[in-house]
Amino acid sequence: MSYNQQKLHKVGYFQELLATNPDIDARLRPLLQLCRQTLVRLRKMEGALVRSLERDPLLVERVERLMTIPAVGPITGLTWALEVGAVKRFSSSKKAIRYCGLCGAEKSSAGIRKRTPISKQSNRICKRCWWRQPR
């Protein structure tokens, strides 16, 4: 089936494609329409949630500081700020990194340094948010 990939996410083009493309089986049209409506609703809900979180003065300040880190955008910053909570509860940056599960422990002996695997007991949401970032 041929379609314009750049226009596919535009509402009018998708409706036109469903109505006029002979390659789309008539039995699939309601299912495709339902999937499209679900995507639109989820995007609106996500946008509303992010906008409401971005209005919180405490979160805005923390997210702005987090976004000074390369590869941290608004969603990653919001996720970290909400998941980690009060940063002051960590006595050192090592403990904060360990909590988020971004680095394993380091063991050194006779000048040889080795890292242990990343713990599975860390905050899985923080870890997942970080590892899904584009590099």
Image (tube, rainbow, N blue to C red):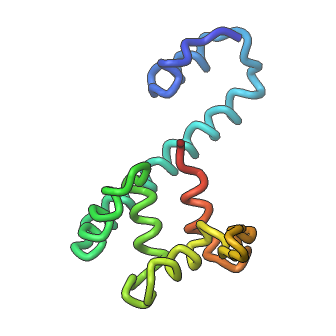
Q: Is residue 125 left or right of residue 29?
A: left
**Nearest the eye: 35 or 86:** 86
Q: Position of residue 21 (x, y in %)?
A: 64, 11
Q: Is residue 113 left or right of residue 85?
A: right
Q: Is residue 89 above or below residue 36?
A: below
Q: Is residue 41 left or right of residue 77?
A: right
Q: Residue visible at 55% across and 43% down?
A: 39
Answer with the quarter of the image where residue 114 lies. Answer: bottom right
Q: Residue visible at 45% across and 22% down?
A: 12
The total of numbered circles placed on residues is: 0
Q: Residue visible at 49% across and 42% down?
A: 40
Q: Is residue 103 left or right of residue 6?
A: right
Q: Residue visible at 47% across and 47% down?
A: 43
**Nearest the eye: 18 or 78:** 78
Q: Is residue 55 above or below residue 72?
A: below
Query: Outermost residue, front direction?
Result: 110
Q: Position of residue 125 (x, y in %)?
A: 59, 68
**Nearest the eye: 36 or 118:** 118
Q: Is residue 86 above or below residue 11?
A: below
Q: Position of residue 81 (x, y in %)?
A: 40, 72
Answer with the quarter of the image where residue 85 lies. Answer: bottom left
Q: Quadrant of the N terminus?
A: top right
